[in-house]
Amino acid sequence: MTTAAAMPRRESNKARTRESILRAAAAKFGAKGIDDTTMDEIAEQAKVSRATLFNYFPNKFDIVATVLAQMDDNFIAKIGNSAALDLPVAARVEHLFTTSGHDLENRWREILPMVGVSAKGWGDEIGGQRFARVRQAFVQLLHDVPEDERMTYAEILASTYIGIAHYWRFEADYALAQHLSAAARTIMRSLK
């Protein structure tokens, strides 16, 4: 990954503008919801002109899709970080579920609207591709599970994580990290 400092100035400015737009969109989505946020409000929050915003993202769907892709990338990186830990598989899974649950809880305002909109896309082609990426990352997390069981556990873990994250949307005082941690322990007990 090329950092903004290593890019030519023009490319660096473009990357900063793009990230500014995405941060502004996530903030607005968290404050108002996706449906009630306008492109003009995103441009104003990002401190860019309407024309600049539309040069980067022709519509709100493209912004939402990009924010979701970033969320996926961040979660897959967390899975990779947990996979690299020198811990037994059950401890790695619980570490991932617990730490990512705390991260989501800490960023709830910007995350909840995105979790909600992601539920709308799991059944279509893009949703299928997203789920396949997450499932494959879980396969890597389970590198020391017998190969004939690895995909099954990856599917169970991915589905459980996603299901619990979606349930979190509906209950204001839902202890997400606690529920994820308990689910990880319960699932991984069956591996013994």
Image (cartoon, rainbow, N blue to C red):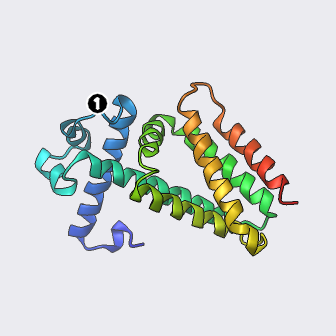
Judge from the rendering whether residue 25 lies leftward or rightward of residue 114; answer left or right: left
Where is residue 27 shown, x and y percent of the image? Answer: 36, 38
Which residue is the extreme one toward the right?
Answer: 192
Work out which residue is located at the far top of the displayed protein and give it: 172
38 relative position to 107: left or right: left
Image quadrant in which the C terminus is located: bottom right
Residue at the image position 29 percent from the left and 62 percent from the top? 15
Q: Nearer the viewer, residue 66 or 129?
A: 129
Taking the spot 80% from the left edge, 47% from the top edge, the residue there is 186
Q: Which residue is most to the left?
A: 51
Q: Position of residue 77 (x, y in %)?
A: 55, 62
Left or right? Give the position of 120 relative to 21. Answer: right
Q: Residues within 10 Å of mark 1 (few under 14, many from 20)?
A: few
Which image quarter: residue 5?
Answer: bottom left
Secondary structure under badge 1? loop
Residue shown at 46%/50% (left/top)?
A: 122
Give the image quarter of residue 43.
top left
Quadrant of the image for the N terminus?
bottom left
Instruction: Note whether 150 is above or below 188 in the view shown.
Output: below
Percent position (x, y) of residue 159? 61, 51
Q: Which residue is mark 1?
A: 36
At a point 45% along the width and 51% down the height, the residue shown is 123
Relative to 85, does residue 121 appear above or below in the rendering?
above
Is residue 153 left or right of 127 when viewed as pictured?
A: right
Residue type for callout 1: Asp
Residue 147's x, y, as percent?
Answer: 74, 74
Total of numbered circles in the picture? Answer: 1
Q: Quadrant of residue 39?
A: top left
